[in-house]
Image (cartoon, grey):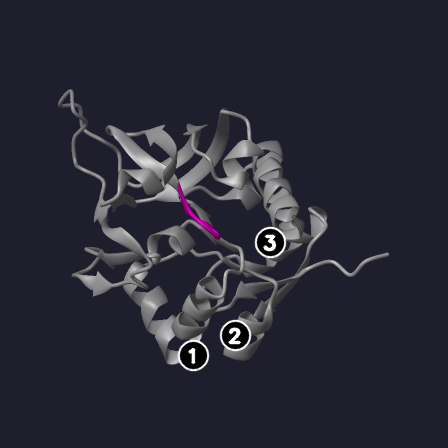
């Protein structure tokens, strides 16, 4: 039996890392939760989950040298899966609690949901609960997923990509926003696959198939 790919689940001091690792294992992968930059660079693929504030996440990534390790893994062509905050940190900056620079791997920024929807109704923030995602694009992950599925979200901020071509999934909440982004060996989602039951399993199964392809 062949050895499953080594998946580094990046441990920067926050996030539901163990539940993400268990979910990846159920999809046939070999996840290792690690705060070691060397292990992240050496892994066959990288998963960056996250909950909490953008600035805190970036500070912890930088303090451990994990920001450089994640960049190096992506630049080396390793598959990257970002979950929730793991999507947001890919961008150039966030305005959460003041402007904070991100990894700068995708053009654009992270902005708070507006207080009101386009029709003037008050918008409840954070966006919590189940919502539909419409996938589109040529990325291998999109090709393996249903055109539309329903996932669990918990977030107050959303990605505003400068390049519309990186948007791989869209959701409506106070207007349309990017619920998934993709470019080359990077795929990231704003929702939580590990909390999204069968729909989340489909995403992680698609990631596993992509990693071994």
* Image: magenta residue range: 181-186
Q: Position of residue 12 (x, y in %)?
A: 45, 69
Q: State the residue position of label 1.
A: 64
Left or right, residue 23 beside residue 190 = right
For residue 85, above or below residue 171: below
Please name which of the two marks, 2 or 3, marks the residue nearer to the observer: 2
Per the model, the C-alpha gap separating discs 2 and 3 is 16 Å
Q: Nearer the viewer, residue 92 or 58?
A: 92
Q: Looking at the rendered structure, which numbered label has been put on residue 120?
A: none
Q: Position of residue 118 (x, y in %)?
A: 16, 24
Give 114 or 92, whichever is nearer the viewer.
92
Cα distance, mark 2 to mark 1? 7 Å
| Image spot of residue 84 (x, y percent) | 41, 49
Q: How many marks?
A: 3
Q: Which residue is mark 2?
A: 35
Q: Is residue 151 above or below residue 182?
A: above
Cβ–Cβ under 8 Å for marks 2 and 1 = yes
- Residue for point 49% across, 44% down: 192
- N-term-proximal mark, 2 vs 1: 2
Residue at point 69% right, 54% down?
29
Q: CA distance from mark 1 to mark 3?
A: 22 Å
Q: Residue at x 20, y 59 (%)?
A: 97
Confirm or deny contact between disc 2 and disc 3 (CB under 8 A).
Answer: no
Which numbered tag is attached to residue 19? 3
Is 154 magenta? The answer is: no
């Amino acid at each position: 039996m062949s050895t499953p790919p080594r998946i580094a689940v990046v441990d920067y001091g926050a996030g539901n890392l163990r539940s993400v690792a268990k979910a990846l294992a159920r999809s046939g992968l070999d996840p290792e939760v690690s705060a070691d930059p060397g292990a992240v660079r050496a892994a066959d693929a990288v998963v960056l989950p996250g909950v909490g504030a953008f600035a805190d996440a970036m500070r912890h990534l930088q303090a451990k040298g994990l920001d450089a390790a994640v960049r190096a893994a992506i630049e080396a062509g390793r598959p990257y899966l970002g979950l929730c905050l793991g999507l947001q940190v890919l961008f150039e900056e966030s305005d959460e609690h003041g402007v904070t620079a991100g990894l700068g791997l995708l053009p654009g920024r992270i902005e708070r949901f507006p207080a009101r929807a386009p029709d003037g109704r008050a918008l409840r923030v954070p966006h919590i609960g189940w919502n539909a995602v419409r996938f589109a694009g040529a990325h291998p992950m999109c090709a393996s997923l249903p055109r539309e599925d329903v996932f669990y979200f918990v977030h107050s901020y959303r990605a505003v990509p400068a390049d519309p071509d990186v948007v791989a999934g869209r959701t409506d909440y106070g207007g349309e926003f990017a619920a998934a982004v993709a470019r080359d060996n990077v795929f990231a989602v704003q929702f939580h696959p590990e909390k999204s039951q069968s729909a989340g399993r489909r995403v992680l199964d698609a990631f596993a198939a992509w990693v071994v392809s």
